Amino acid sequence: MKNKLISLLCAGVILASGLVGCSTASTSKSPATKPLTVENSSENVSATRTISTKLGDVKVSSNPKRVIVQYLMGDVISLGIKPVGISEVYTGAAYHNITAGIKDLGHFGSWDVEAVMLLKPDLIITIDKEQSEKLSKIAPTVYVPYGDISTEERVTLIGQALNKEKEAKEVIGNYHANIEASKKKLQKAGFNNLTISVLEGDQKSMGVKGGKFGTGMVAYNALSLKAPQKVQKNIIDKDSFAEEVSFEVLPEYCGDYIIRNVYEGMDDLTKNKIWNSLPAIKNNRLIEMEFGLSYYTDIYSANAQVNYITNALLKAQSSKVIGKDKQ
């Protein structure tokens, strides 16, 4: 497996290149979700509804029973629906155990049309604009412009597609409540005055994440954690997803705490002089998050990340600190 991930969004499509493998342990607590329902056979449903999407109006079943979804599996699961087909799920994903037994169609950028057809879907939810037209010939297809809409707008749209609008409002409300409770804990501990960096990379270069994807989205947007000035100016203010930086300039992008996405086979940085010189590393303020948990930003995964980041930051703060910044 390759040793790094560059997650980019282009025309509403996540182009995940160099996807990495993940370790097998998962330490996050899965958020509560609705009881899941799924049908084993397709049915003719005469009643339809029309929903508006970025690509135009789409007629969907009033009661979709065989749903296929790309990347946003957690949004669908949170609304009580167990899909019949999904894109790949990495070990460590918040819903990894829930999706066991569901047909894995592989990375969403390279789905096989015949494999999709064999599942006899009555609704397809895609984040890939380029595939949308092709998939719409198989079943009603709802394109979700991930990256261009908020979590609330996205879950609302998917709720409309699944005829689960009431459930969507409830899920969003619970998400907001969890965020507010977590923010209060962090503010009480003084994290509103501290900076957080989100990193992923190897010995050659490090990907510094902004607030548009994965852990960065949860840390900076949901939890309102403060980014280092360089990250704010060069990445977040420019509405970028991430920036690849060399180790020579990495210290300029690193805050009081570092969240590093980790995966099986990643480079060991414990002997890297620059890495070890970072205040966050010297002061035991490194938080490692499993790649499978950090990669997905559906509302189910985001809830799990909120819990993980909050608990990990509080734990790191209370641990023994080495260096001049002792607490």
Image (cartoon, rainbow, N blue to C red):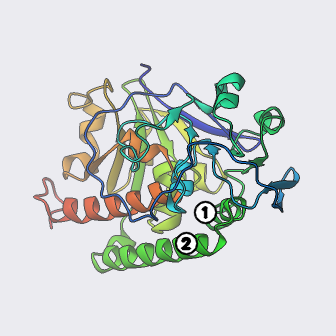
Quadrant where the N terminus is found in the figure? top left
Quadrant where the C terminus is found in the figure? bottom left
| Residue ID at (44%, 64%) | 33
Callout 2 crowding tier (Cα within 10 Å): few <14, some 14–19, many ≥20: some
Q: Where is residue 37 in the image (x, y as percent from the top left)?
A: 51, 56
Question: Mark 1: which amino acid?
Answer: Thr
Mark seen at residue 151: 1
Q: Position of residue 239 (x, y in %)?
A: 66, 52
What's the CA distance linking mark 1 and mark 2? 8 Å
Image quarter for residue 206?
top left
Secondary structure category for the residue under label 1: helix
| Residue ID at (67%, 30%) | 116
Residue that lies at the very extreme toward the top in this rendered image: 1
Q: Is residue 145 left or right of residue 291?
A: right
Image quarter for residue 313?
bottom left
Residue that lies at the very extreme toward the left in this rendered image: 320
Q: Position of residue 73 (x, y in %)?
A: 54, 48
Kindly tell me whether residue 141 is visible in this rendering: yes
Q: Mark 2 points at which residue?
A: 172
Q: Where is residue 29 in the image (x, y as percent from the top left)?
A: 30, 58
Q: Nearer the viewer, mark 1 or mark 2?
A: 2
Mark seen at residue 283: none
Callout 1 crowding tier (Cα within 10 Å): few <14, some 14–19, many ≥20: some
The disc, 1 or 2, on the residue closer to the chain's N-terminal end is: 1
As drawn, 189 above or below 42: below
As drawn, 241 above or below 45: above
As drawn, 30 above or below 84: below
Q: Nearer the viewer, residue 152 or 257?
A: 152
Tell me whether circle 1 and circle 2 mark residues in contact (CB < 8 Å): yes
Question: Mark 2: which amino acid?
Answer: Ile
Q: Nearer the viewer, residue 178 or 200?
A: 178
Q: Which of 89 and 152 is in front in this view?
A: 89
